[in-house]
């Protein structure tokens, strides 16, 4: 991230130290005990921002080499670097291990760092991640997990479908899980129409987009039994919202888009609703 403007290095580092003191996950190491991985929360950890002065070209090489292996037994499982390009131009580098963070955690960290750097004090945390981990292992939660397991086993009983997407080349002998991302922007009119459709259908925007995606896969394959994996935030209680930690999970959602069914549509530029056939 490029930082422009006056930067107080002492306050900058103090803000990260305050974050580490505030969130136990940032002071957590992982060790093997009797063949099992366990978390150990340290009261103090060694932390220092990596400072360097460099030109634009040299900075690119420094950024590329910044992400490197962590020793998970030695917290903190994060590192921060600052490249000074000029007096009021810096590059902030930040690397945090996925074992103690997810996408929501990154948002929390950026927001709290900004407040701490600005001299504000975030509200005290009611619980820490270890409390959540202990709750997961509680007897009441284990009973709940058994009920959830029974539900998902029922959802995925019988033969499971394999998506047969048409391709323009032969499938390789060995499966690869390499992928890519395709980014695009939906214009304001289409975005408003989708949100209107969600309200009319009594659904969320996520549900509408998942239905459209499943319909697209049905169009390509002709299959009427499709499973789509969807990441979820996993923060099921309000006290978990401000925590830095790894809560994310993946739900495998099974849908049955049949060719004779209809999907409600909103014609572009129209405020009325219609129906389109699958």
Image (tube, rainbow, N blue to C red):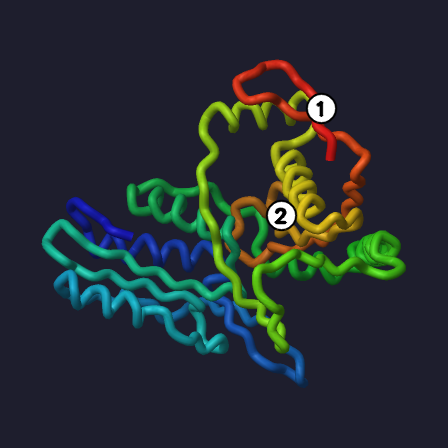
| View extreme (bottom): residue | 34
Q: Quadrant of residue 31?
A: bottom right
Q: Which mark is residue 235?
A: 2
Judging from the image, what secondary structure is the residue with disc 2 in?
loop
Circle 1 residues within 10 Å: few <14, some 14–19, many ≥20 = few
Q: Which residue is mark 1?
A: 275
Give the residue drawn at x 16%, y 59%: 84
Q: Is residue 162 above or below residue 88?
A: below
Circle 2 residues within 10 Å: few <14, some 14–19, many ≥20 = some
Quadrant of the image containing the C terminus: top right
Between residue 122 and residue 238, name the one nearer to us.
238
Q: Can residue 38 be seen in the rendering of this structure?
A: no
Q: Is residue 266 above or below residue 210?
A: above
Relative to residue 210, is residue 15 drawn left or right?
left
| View extreme (left): residue | 87
Relative to residue 107, is residue 149 drawn left or right?
right
In the image, residue 164 lies at what x, y percent?
70, 58
Give the residue drawn at x 70%, y 27%: 276
In the image, residue 265 lies at what x, y percent?
66, 25
Between residue 117 and residue 216, name the one nearer to us.
216
Judging from the image, what secondary structure is the residue with disc 1 in?
strand
Q: Is residue 19 above or below residue 187?
A: below
In the image, residue 15 lies at what x, y percent?
32, 53
Q: Quadrant of residue 154?
A: bottom right
In the image, residue 109 lies at what x, y percent?
42, 50
Q: Can residue 95 be seen in the rendering of this structure?
A: yes
């Amino acid at each position: 991230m490029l930082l422009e403007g006056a930067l107080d290095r002492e306050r900058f580092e103090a803000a990260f130290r305050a974050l580490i003191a505030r969130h136990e996950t940032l002071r957590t190491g992982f060790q093997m005990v009797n063949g099992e991985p366990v978390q150990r929360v340290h009261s103090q950890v060694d932390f220092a921002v990596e400072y360097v002065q460099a030109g634009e070209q040299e900075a690119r090489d420094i950024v590329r080499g910044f992400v490197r292996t962590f020793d998970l037994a030695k917290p903190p499982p994060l590192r921060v670097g600052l490249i000074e390009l000029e007096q009021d131009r810096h590059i902030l580098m930040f690397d945090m291990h996925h074992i103690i963070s997810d996408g929501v955690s990154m948002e929390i960290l950026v927001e709290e760092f900004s407040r701490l750097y600005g001299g504000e004090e975030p509200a005290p945390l009611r619980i820490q991640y270890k409390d959540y981990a202990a709750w997961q292992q509680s007897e009441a939660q284990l009973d709940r997990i058994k009920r959830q397991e029974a539900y998902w086993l029922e959802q995925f009983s019988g033969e499971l479908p394999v998506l047969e997407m048409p391709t323009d080349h032969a499938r390789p002998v060995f499966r690869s899980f390499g992928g890519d991302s395709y980014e695009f922007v939906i214009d304001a009119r289409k975005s408003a129409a989708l949100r209107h459709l969600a309200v009319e259908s009594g659904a969320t925007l996520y549900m509408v987009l998942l239905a459209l995606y499943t319909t697209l896969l049905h169009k390509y394959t002709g299959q009427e039994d499709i499973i789509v994996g969807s990441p979820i935030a996993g923060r099921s209680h309000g006290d978990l919202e401000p925590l830095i930690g790894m809560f994310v999970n993946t739900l495998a959602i099974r849908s049955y888009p049949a060719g004779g069914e209809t999907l409600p549509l909103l014609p572009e530029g129209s405020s009325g609703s219609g129906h389109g056939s699958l």
